[in-house]
Amino acid sequence: MGSNPRVLVRLLVAFALFAGWVAGDAVAQSSSADAGQHRKESAASPGERSGDAGNDAAPVVALQPPAGYRVGVDDELVISVWHEPEFSQSVVVRPDGMITLPLLNDIKVVGLSTEELRALMTEKLKTLVNDPQVTIIVKSIKSMKVFLAGSVAKQGMYPLTSGMTALQLITQAGGLGPFAKGGSIYILRTVNGKETRIPFNYKKALKGQGSDPVLQTGDMVVVP
């Protein structure tokens, strides 16, 4: 039985139309799925869309101030007020002992402990904020200094970090000079207006023997 050309043409046209319809439906479904995924991603928070990229702001690294710390010139502080970003600032204490905050203007902070400063800020903010929750973070201490003189690799002034000892200071300065008398080192410290001398034996401290005094601001370590 011979094939009818017209029938074959009709069958081919029908097949082509059917194939086109199937392909179009698949594309439509794929586009719909992509659009749904895009909407889902758009609804997600920036952090969810790009992992940790949403956390652009690096956390503030707080220092542990030495015992008896009081705010001094050039110290860097972070004043944080809960839910009040306009009052949350990183500030550096000026040479006049002041810091400046929006709407509060100049505030004298030199000589205050962190707790005293927190109480002062809380009181000042009560006229502007309902129940202010204030946190004081010490970010950098540049006002507390110690001094090193004598037969060492590098004499001079050094910032005092929390818990710094005489041995740590000398190590930071590059160690003793070739003719230093390690057993005769002393620390000059002023207490209540009176200068005292604290002995320090470098060689014993290196061996974990004897005392290794914790330094206080203003101390002068002398290496004969």
Image: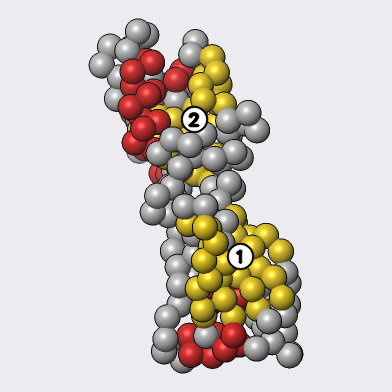
Q: Which residue is mark 2?
A: 109
| Left or right for 63, reference 135 | right
Closer to the camera in the image, 211 or 172: 211
- Which residue sits furthest front? 194
> Marks 1 and 2, Cα distance to the nearest angstrom?
26 Å
Task: Assess disc 2: are there few (<14), some (14-19) or many (≥20) residues with their C-alpha within 10 Å of its C-alpha.
Answer: many
For the C terminus, the image quarter is: bottom right
Above/below status of 173 relative to 16: below
Q: Position of residue 140 (x, y in %)?
A: 53, 46
**x 45%, y 68%: residue:** 214
Closer to the camera in the image, 122 or 30: 122
- Which residue sits furthest top? 127
Closer to the camera in the image, 195 or 1: 195
Report which quarter residue 208 is drawn in: bottom left
Question: Badges 1 and 2: C-beta atoms under 8 Å apart?
Answer: no
**x 69%, y 87%: residue:** 180
Mark nearest the camera among 1 and 2 is 1
Q: How many marks?
A: 2
Q: Which mark is residue 220?
A: 1
- Which residue sits furthest left? 131
| Left or right for 156, reference 24 | right
For the N terminus, the image quarter is: top left
Which amino acid, by three-letter code, is at mark 2?
Val
Badge 1 element: strand
Q: Position of residue 85 (x, y in %)?
A: 43, 21
Badge 2 element: loop
Closer to the camera in the image, 215 or 190: 190
> How are the colours assigned in the image?
secondary structure
Q: Earlier in the sequence, mark 1 or mark 2?
A: 2
Q: Position of residue 32 (x, y in %)?
A: 36, 25
**x 48%, y 85%: residue:** 205
Q: Position of residue 94 (x, y in %)?
A: 62, 31
